[in-house]
Image (spheres, rainbow, N blue to C red):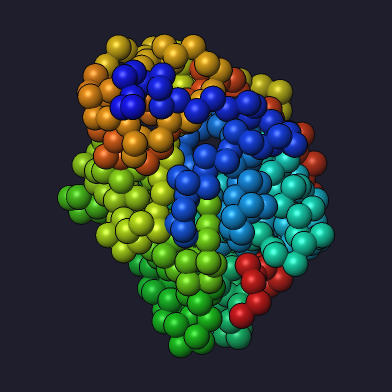
Amino acid sequence: MPAQSIRDIVNPLLTLDPDTRDNSDLEILRDLVGEARVVCLGESAHFASEFVLLRDRIVRYLVRELGFSAFVLESGLPEGLAVDEWVRGGPGSLATIARRGITYAFGRCEEMHAQLQWMRGWNATHSHQVGFYGMDVPGWCANPAAGVAACLNRLSPQPGDRELLAAAGLGDPTRAASADGSDTPDVPAELSRGITELVARAAAADDEIALRCAYGAQRVVEFLQHGLYPEPGRNLRNEVMADNLHWILGREERVIVGAHNVHLQRTPSFDGTEPIGSLLAPVLGQELVVVGTTRGAGIVPGVDLDATPARRYATPAGEFSAPSHSLDALLDAIGLPHHLVDLRHAPPELLASATAMSGQTQLIDVDPKQAFDAVVHIHQITPAHGTTDQVTDEPLDWRRQSPTSE
């Protein structure tokens, strides 16, 4: 019998707790995921506890039940090499690794720490390993030093390497730059040339990881010179993330990707550029599944890195009120705390009234059925729980970082 209302296609979720033993509610993922190699899990707001918990729970299920082998995050690729080593049993404190190895402050909450701890525990007891990758540009898209350092420490040393690394340390590596790059330092011509030469060195050395890191540093330079949109129709970060994800798929059979909805959707983004889902859909076809998220009205968490850990994500970025024509309002009216809707099987008329979705504190025009394969709705989001930073001044040893052996 055809669905008569949106309630007829809703799949309630029992909990967001990743440690639950009852995962019967997630069995719907078997049909949704099928034989896909890439499952994208979006979030409509960063720094929300519930979205990180949901992602962690789904990651664990896909690793356990469907054999997924890597988690890929909207975070710097070079920095993420240290996280991968740690989840595979490497040295270091979790607080230090997560803070320095995950950019945009996504690693400085208890929820992310719990996921990394689970990954490490899984790898310690299973031959089927799960890895960690960043897919974004290094240095919060503002500083190429992490990419330069990670590359240099995989190559045979040459005169001038130390000077190149010193020159690459532009500004604060823990503050995101504005989209137009107007608040970023100028890039010396010598540094730009040095990074271009570094790309050539990495390619000649036939070291794929070094080359990825050098490319990342080069893209940061492009951002600093031309902003997030170096040309009409181009979003530099989305291009880099899609390219890195394509490279990761050459190393991993099945991966889970975590990022904001607007980076993952299949349709053009609010800025008119192509997100990761749109860029990779022609290549992956049915091997790509994109799951977005919506939420009820309320406070949207922000981040204040100068605040105490307890207040780090509690400073509001603003409020969001779901208007009647949003998918958020349509799904929130069902009255469940959290549920999943498979949009592939939803009759178009049931979604006809939904022409927009939330994105941070904004409302973004989108056709949900075209942009996502499924959506998880969470009635109420709350700020993530900041972790105490017990970080030493000892620099990370870039030379020991590698996602997997060559």
Question: Quick one: 91 or 34, which is closer to the camera?
Answer: 34
- Relative vertical location of residue 212 with respect to residue 154 in this rendering, above or below: above
373, above or below 243, in the image:
above
Is residue 133 visible to us here? yes
- Say whether residue 401 is left or right of residue 2: right
Q: Position of residue 307 (x, y in %)?
A: 65, 25
Place of residue 106 in the rendered image (x, y in percent of width and height, measured from the top left): 59, 40
Instruction: Give the residue furthest to the left.
Output: 232
Tally of numbered discs: 0
In this orientation, which residue lies closer to the viewer: 31 or 148?
A: 31
Identify the residue at image location x=67%, y=68%: 401
- Quarter of the image for residue 325 reads top left
The answer to whether residue 282 is above or below residue 46 is below
**Residue 351 percent across, percent down from the top left:** 28, 25
Q: Is residue 164 visible?
A: no
The C terminus - image quarter: bottom right
At horizontal 20% and vertical 54% (from top left) the residue drawn is 231
Nearer to us in this view, 123 or 275: 123
Quadrant of the image containing the N terminus = top left
Which residue sits at x=53%, y=57%? 255
List x then y, in percent, for residue 259.
Answer: 47, 43
